[in-house]
Image (cartoon, grey):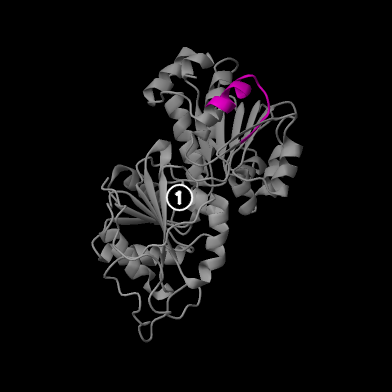
């Protein structure tokens, strides 16, 4: 299939070509035709597969006819980064359409959002909490919504947004097209789908599997040597675009400072940063101003940077789904990528869970010359799980043999 076969409006085809799209990805090929037909849809796909365009193009096609300057499509998403990413896709694909869109999320002043709502937009991309604020203050009306998209529904559940989403559902017309996208379907999401959708078609691509273009490796290490091993990994790695995940925002900030002192151009992304700081961090990471970004899981589904070559899990994620979403930041659009995870002996159960989910044993690696037996410095505390040094970490010896020079 190619995009010409989808019978899209010529104005959208202009946007498709300008955005560099060649042929639809599997999720786009599966989801766009039923969405164009107006069917309710449940979509599941691994991250980095082009899911956003799978619902944006049908929305734009629908909005090219009918009234303008009235909000006719609502996309609800859990984080401000995802909201901006979706809005960027709308503007790229709809560049020749004249369709207007706006983002609504917290952490920034309300007046500019109020002006955008007052001036009129056809597509609203919103985080649940701030959208409800605008509804309560009379700034936003959803009675004209024709298409509703619930994106990253499982993430909204994880973040406690389902009650807010249910409130939003009461504000939109019962007669509408609804599309729900979720990487996983816990019972709560199945219940939400049953409430929000009518006779939905289901499309699923690459369920709970990382991209085949990503190479995995585990690096056993005592907790107190994680920062030292991270620095050693970076010495052996092409550091043009490296994303490092930590468990907490405090550790993200501390690790970023330590890497910066070691000479790397580093930024961080976590919930303590303002929206302007977060956007500046993302922009600088995209354009190469920063070689390394240290982030919490807020970035696991909110970064759309095609050129990330390496993901390093400074802290192993708690679930297999989180692991897959983290490493999905590299190996995007069929590019090659590497995912390195630092693991302590206390992580054994989590490692086994992840290996079962990805269907393979992940190789254990060590770096030649690194002192894995160095003791904990006196009067030094490190955050994270309590861990006493266990001596030499296990795994295959040798230096990095698989590290591509990209």
Q: Position of residue 18 (x, y in %)?
A: 37, 23
Q: Is residue 34 magenta?
A: yes
Identify the residue shown where x is 53% and y is 56%.
355
Give the quadrant of residue 41.
top right
| Residue 313 shown left or right of residue 197 in the figure | left
Q: Position of residue 396 (x, y in %)?
A: 37, 64
Give the quadrant of residue 213.
top left
* Mark 1 lies on residue: 327
Badge 1 density bin: few <14, some 14–19, many ≥20, Cα 10 Å = many
Residue 317 sits above or below residue 154 on the image? below
The outermost residue toward the bottom is: 378
- Magenta-colored span: 29-43
- 374 or 140: nearer the eye? 374
Visible residue check, residue 165:
yes
Image quarter where the C terminus lies is: top left
- 306 or 108: nearer the eye? 306
Q: Is residue 273 magenta?
A: no
The outermost residue toward the front is: 396
Q: Position of residue 36 (x, y in %)?
A: 60, 20
Q: Position of residue 204 (x, y in %)?
A: 60, 35
Visible residue check, residue 300:
no
Query: Please, what secondary structure does the residue beneath circle 1 have?
Result: helix
| Residue 91 shown left or right of residue 121 in the figure | left
């Amino acid at each position: 299939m190619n995009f010409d076969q989808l019978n899209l409006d010529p104005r959208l085809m202009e946007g498709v070509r300008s955005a560099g799209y060649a042929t639809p990805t599997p999720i786009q090929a599966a989801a766009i035709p039923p969405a164009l037909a107006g069917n309710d849809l449940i979509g599941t796909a691994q991250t980095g597969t082009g899911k956003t365009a799978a619902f944006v193009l049908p929305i734009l096609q629908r909005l090219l006819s009918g009234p303008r300057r009235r909000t006719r499509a609502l996309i609800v998403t859990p984080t401000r980064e995802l909201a901006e990413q979706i809005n960027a896709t709308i503007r790229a694909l709809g560049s020749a359409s004249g369709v207007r869109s706006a983002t609504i999320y917290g952490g920034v002043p309300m007046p500019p959002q109020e002006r955008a709502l007052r001036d009129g937009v056809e597509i609203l991309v919103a985080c649940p909490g701030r959208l409800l604020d605008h509804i309560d203050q009379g700034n936003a009306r959803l009675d004209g919504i024709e298409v509703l998209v619930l994106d990253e529904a499982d993430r909204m559940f994880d973040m406690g947004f389902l009650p807010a989403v249910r409130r939003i559902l009461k504000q939109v017309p019962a007669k509408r097209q609804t599309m729900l996208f979720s990487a996983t379907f816990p019972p709560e999401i199945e219940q939400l789908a049953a409430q929000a959708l009518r006779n939905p078609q289901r499309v699923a691509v690459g369920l709970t599997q990382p991209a085949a273009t990503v190479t995995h490796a585990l690096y056993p290490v005592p907790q107190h040597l994680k920062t030292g091993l991270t620095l050693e990994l970076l010495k052996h790695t092409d550091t043009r675009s490296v994303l490092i995940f930590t468990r907490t925002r405090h550790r993200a900030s501390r690790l970023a400072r330590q890497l910066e002192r070691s000479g790397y151009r580093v930024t961080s992304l976590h919930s303590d940063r303002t929206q302007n700081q977060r956007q500046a961090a993302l922009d600088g990471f995209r354009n190469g101003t920063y070689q390394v970004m240290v982030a919490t899981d807020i970035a696991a589904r909110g970064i759309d940077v095609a050129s990330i070559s390496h993901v390093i899990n400074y802290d192993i994620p708690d679930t297999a789904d989180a692991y897959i979403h983290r490493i999905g930041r590299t190996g995007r659009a069929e590019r090659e990528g590497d995912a390195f995870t630092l693991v302590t002996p206390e992580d054994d159960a989590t490692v086994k869970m992840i290996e079962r989910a990805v269907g393979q044993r992940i190789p254990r690696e060590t770096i030649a010359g690194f002192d894995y037996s160095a003791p904990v410095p006196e009067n030094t505390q490190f955050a994270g799980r309590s861990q006493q040094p266990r001596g030499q970490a296990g795994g295959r010896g040798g230096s990095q043999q698989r590290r591509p020079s990209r």
